[in-house]
Amino acid sequence: MSQSKVLITEEIAPEGIEALRARGYQVDVMADLAPDQLREVIEPYDALIVRSGTVVDAALLDAAVNLKIIGRAGVTVDNIDIEAADERGIIVCNAPTSNIISAAEYALAMLLAAARRIPQANASMHAGKWDRRDFMGSELYGKTLAIFGLGRVGSLVAERAKAFGMELIAYDPYCSPDKAAQLDVTLYDSVEDVLPKADFITVHLPKTDETIGMFGPEQFAAMKTGVVVVNCARAGIFEVDALADFVAAGKVGAAALDVFEEEPCTQGPLHELEGAILTPHVNAVTREAQVRAGEQIAEYVWAGLEGSIVPTAIHASGLPPEVMDAVRPYLPACRMMGRVVAELCGGIPQKLTVQPEGAIADADPDLLVAGVVDGILSYKHVGASVPDTARSVAERHGMTVVTKTVEDAQEYASDVRVRADEVEIASTLYGVDMLPRIVSMMGYKIDIAPAAQSLIFEYVDAPGRIGTIGTVLGEAGVNITTMQIGTKPEDKCALVYMNVEGEVTEEVLAQLRSALELRNLWHIKL
């Protein structure tokens, strides 16, 4: 089998490049290619990784006869012709969570800079002045912050603003009341209800027909006098000419913008105003965000080249965007659960039930089914599945697939539960990067992030069991990194999920079985 080739046309973090090379791919970096030069060299490549500077249009895709996947090392895909790629069966994916922390922190930085007039004070000092009285600011504490858009970035802004003691209100017609309550945000049904209440306004919205020009003269007039407005999301949400008029008049106390309709933007109606803070689209420009983008896109490109599910594939499934946004963060969790249940079953199960619960209960489950089936098949290295064919692929391998939904995920906002023959496992997501966490297994309640290698013990509960396990593993040079214990008091049984490092040989497993009275022992490798 020939070696897959990956072409990278713009700078990405070295960690992403090394991750692809470590998987055996030929990776070539060719920066600053002109469009005609790129068309000349693209033919032999299986994957293309770009950022915002490379235009991927139909003409380029016509020349890319071997291309299987395009990875955008960042959030937006405005420079890629999605329809043309879809027509040619080429997957397009991005790294949508790579810069969300950087973006949220930058929005808070802009709020603080505007509230305390930090750029103006800095400019005064550089001009050789010491004018303390000219830079009276205002605190964030006790003020009302209106957040337009409670998605990934908006939610992180809410969490951080709460730490400043701000009162949080928001407008987001797609945000559930439960999510807003978890963030301690008061949700309003209309823009008009929010505007007169806010001391500070920050927008975290996509650029759509509904959001372009969302804030114009009427909206600025309805705001409090002295309000501070921030846009680090998408250009066009604020009508800049109108905003400049209201800043000049003092109705808007300060405006802080990091995004512009035409970039580079070196002049405009806000550039001459002292009350405007303008930065050159740098909200995501941090070392950490660049590393995440490189590592994430390398992982997704690898998945696409191997025929696996690509969690951030755009238009690849035919599902509407709102469905994809709800369920695709669960794809890695579903694939992980599929792999685990295959190992617990010792092979491909006959009956498979996939059950989304809580906030994702109403979402189309086909994407989740594809993830689980993909994980199961990876255990035997017998193929992969995509949403459109997951059920038929499962049937070809002897699996009957059933989907159910449960509205209540109990203590979690949402989770996915998988049953494979007699095996049961459930997973939710946690943290900014929405990583999988196992919350139930075989009827035992646990809470653990699975590692690459794990041992799972089920036994009649009795004193000294964990000590015995630790002794056997310690003598074998196997380190226990994390561990969770779930119990069934009615059965007097316990299940121990243990992440380990080191070589777990068949001899070690035999020693564990002989030293303990076990119902089950599984050695899981993800």
Image (tube, rainbow, N blue to C red):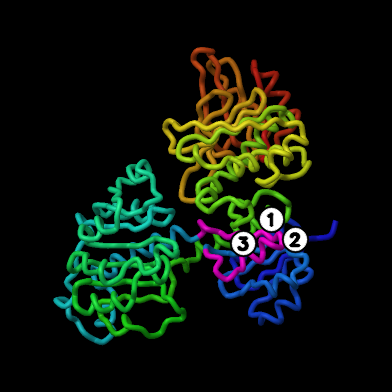
Task: Report the front residue among 514 and 131.
Answer: 131
Q: Position of residue 459 (x, y in %)?
A: 60, 18
In the drawing, does residue 415 fall left or right of residue 452?
left
**Which mark identifies residue 514?**
none
List the residue tagged with mark 3.
Answer: 15
Question: Alpha carbon of mark 3 to alpha carbon of mark 2: how far?
Answer: 14 Å
- The amino acid on which the numbered mark 3 sits, given as a three-letter code, is Glu
- Chain part drawn in magenta: 76-98
In the drawing, does residue 67 fall left or right of residue 118?
right
Residue drawn at 36 percent across, 53 percent down: 172
Q: Earlier in the sequence, mark 1 or mark 2?
A: 2
List the residue tagged with mark 2.
Answer: 25
- Quadrant of image for the C terminus: top right
In the drawing, does residue 85 fall left or right of residue 435?
right
List the residue tagged with mark 1.
Answer: 302
Q: Nearer the viewer, mark 1 or mark 3?
A: 1
- The amino acid on which the numbered mark 1 sits, given as a three-letter code, is Trp
Question: Alpha carbon of mark 1 to alpha carbon of mark 2: how far?
Answer: 9 Å
Q: Residues within 10 Å of mark 2 (few under 14, many from 20)?
A: some
Q: Is residue 216 visible?
A: yes
- In the image, residue 447 sits, relative to residue 323, either above or below, namely above
Instruction: For mark 3, give the secondary structure.
Output: helix
Q: Position of residue 354 (x, y in %)?
A: 60, 33
Question: Alpha carbon of mark 1 to alpha carbon of mark 3: how far?
Answer: 14 Å
Q: Earlier in the sequence, mark 1 or mark 3?
A: 3
Instruction: For mark 2, give the secondary structure.
Output: loop
Task: Report the front residue among 129 and 216.
Answer: 216
- The amino acid on which the numbered mark 2 sits, given as a three-letter code, is Tyr
- Quadrant of image for the N terminus: bottom right
